[in-house]
Image (cartoon, helix red, strand yellow):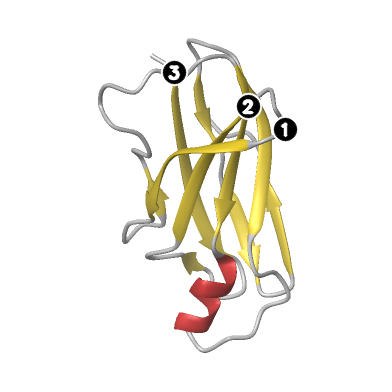
Amino acid sequence: MTQITTHVLDTSQGKPVVDMTVFLYQYQNNNDWEAIGGGATDDDGRLPDMLGEDAVLTEGIYKLKFATEEYYESVGINTFYPYVEIVFYLNKGEHYHVPLLVSPYGYSTYRGS
């Protein structure tokens, strides 16, 4: 089963990002993005289920959008990035774990396991 998960860590504070809003989009042929899922990170900074149980992901281009400014405002810190978008290819039948390491003035990502 194809699945997309994420994990967000705040490297400036050395802890998981709790309650960050994350949106999942699928690229459409007409140069638009369709919102297909999302949620908020849990107490460990993880979002293990962005889609309903019956969702079927097809091969294509997807995007995760992380509400970084919303998070940093909630902890009283200014940030340079209002949000972070990660665009990636998805092949059917694989698991995709897309972590985000974030700080107020930088971020990095990679394909996790």
Q: Earlier in the sequence, mark 3 or mark 2?
A: 3
CA gap, disc 3 and disc 2: 19 Å
Which numbered marker is on residue 51?
Answer: none
Residue 74 is drawn in which quadrant?
Answer: bottom left
Cβ atoms at labels 2 and 1 below 8 Å apart: yes
Farthest left residue in view: 53
Q: Residues within 10 Å of mark 3 (few under 14, many from 20)?
A: some
* Residue in the image at 47% along x and 83% along y: 75
Q: Determine whether, in the image, residue 92 is placed left or right of residue 103.
A: left
Tell me where residue 36 appears, x and y as whole percent.
44, 36
Tell me where residue 38 appears, x and y as whole percent.
41, 45
Q: Nearer the viewer, mark 3 or mark 1?
A: 1
Which numbered marker is on residue 31?
Answer: 1
Q: Which residue is denoted by mark 3 in the rendering?
A: 2
Position of 76 relative to 39 (above/below): below
* Residue in the image at 67% along x and 31% along y: 88
Q: Secondary structure at mark 1?
A: loop
